[in-house]
Image (cartoon, grey):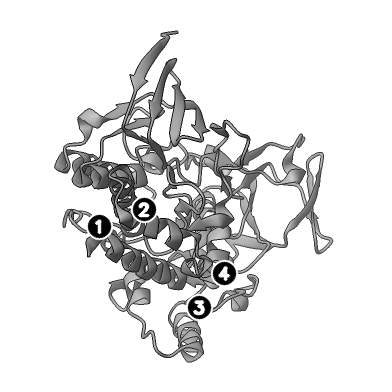
Amino acid sequence: MHEAVTASSQKVLVIGAGPAGLAAAASLKAAGVAFSVVDFASEVGGAYVRDALWPDLATVTSRHGNQFEEMVAPASFPAFPTREQMVAYLRAYVAKHDLADDIRLGVGVRKATAFADQRWQVELSNGEIGTYRALVVATGACASPLLPAWAEGAGTRVIHSDEYRGEDLFEKKVLVVGAGQAAADVATRVADSADETRLSMRSGHWVVPRHIGGLPGDMAASARPSLLGRLNDKIGNRVVARLHGDPREVGMPAPAAPVTRDRVIVSDTLLQDVETGRIGVCADVRALSEDRVTFVDGTDWEPDLIICATGYRSDLSFLASADGSKLTDFSSLAWGTFPRDRDDLVFLGQFSLVGGTIPVVAQQADLAAYHFRALFNDSPAATVFRQMRQDNRHAGPGLQGQLDSLRVPQRERAELLTQLSTARRLFES
């Protein structure tokens, strides 16, 4: 292994070359802040280059709602681009902002230790050790697959959806476990070939189509009137139920929130698949004994394969503090980005956002770049911004609760964008 020690640096280290990391790189470059980007992967793209996503799986956010403001997605892209198209788009973003020379691929962070003098000692996977002024952690919220406790040591074949590549499963009885977007995508794909497909759901969500009235579904949702309050919630529920269907009427669990505040499932076929019996809906899993699954309603089943679309956890085990203090308390992040008690650490892209991630991480990245420029230049704005971060009111109680849940609905996403825009005015005035 190559062992080397680099000289102390005035750079910001960006960890991750997905949309959030690339947004950070572009913003830091525009602000004149020195930086480097590292990523374990062999190409830029983050979650879009993960093997777990089959190539023809389309995104659930339209290209109009998930693009950088300064670089419109190609008109040749469909309304909902594929993984490969999004990777191509991000490569073009790198070229547009001339970032290639600042990105090191195939190299990740083994350990990053924070010291009291606002310096980070970073050990890279190739053995290099360097010091940095600050860190931008853009490793994403889907770094480590999460399996339920009952799946540990299972006798039946159990995999996480992270391992499913979209292959056909002929002559198989397949149980998909999960209530979110990934579970819906996997279940509808599996149902095309499996002998029997069942979907185990702990909770209910609204299902919306990719297009509503000729518009991509996320664009139609964002165009809803904002002044109707709870009446708007009722209208939204009725419109979606009338145009696309009510999950309760086909035997799915009742949605726990109005459609305007729900973490909706985007699918053109899920409700129809359930209604026609292509996908059977089951209760939550209670236990797995050898090859038989027992559900919380007392029923059981013996599948050939269980695919758990049960989410991910952020893997931030590489972060450490020389004094032993905690660095990864997401509940204390201002705007889902900034620790309230550290100037030299920023998190980007750690939350899944309904309605498109890129516009949000771009604003977070701009704010982070302004913050670091002010901090490194000893600008009074850095002190004011520190106080803003420490003020809990800037997170908003409703918003903070959603950030803690790692998936932010459309309404709270809009609130977050408004708050980020307000915070930026400190540096733009």
Amino acid found under the numbered disc labelled 4:
His
* Mark closest to the chain's N terminus, 3 or 4: 4
Q: Which residue is mark 3?
A: 245
Camera-nearest label, 4 or 1: 4
Q: CA distance from mark 2 to mark 4?
A: 20 Å
Secondary structure, mark 3, is loop
Q: Are marks 3 and 2 in contact (CB under 8 Å)?
A: no
Q: In the rendered structure, find residue 58 and report the number of the disc placed on it.
A: 2
User: Marks 1 and 3, Cα distance to the nearest angstrom?
Assistant: 25 Å
Determine whether 229 is above or below 181 in the image: below
Q: Is residue 424 left or right of residue 92?
A: right
Q: Are marks 1 and 3 in contact (CB under 8 Å)?
A: no
* Location of the N terminus (image quadrant): top left
Of circles 2 and 4, the one toward us is 4
Q: CA distance from mark 3 to mark 4?
A: 12 Å
Single out the mark in the foreground, 3 or 4.
4
Q: In the picture shown, does residue 145 fall above or below 121? A: below
**CB contact under 8 Å: marks 2 and 4:** no
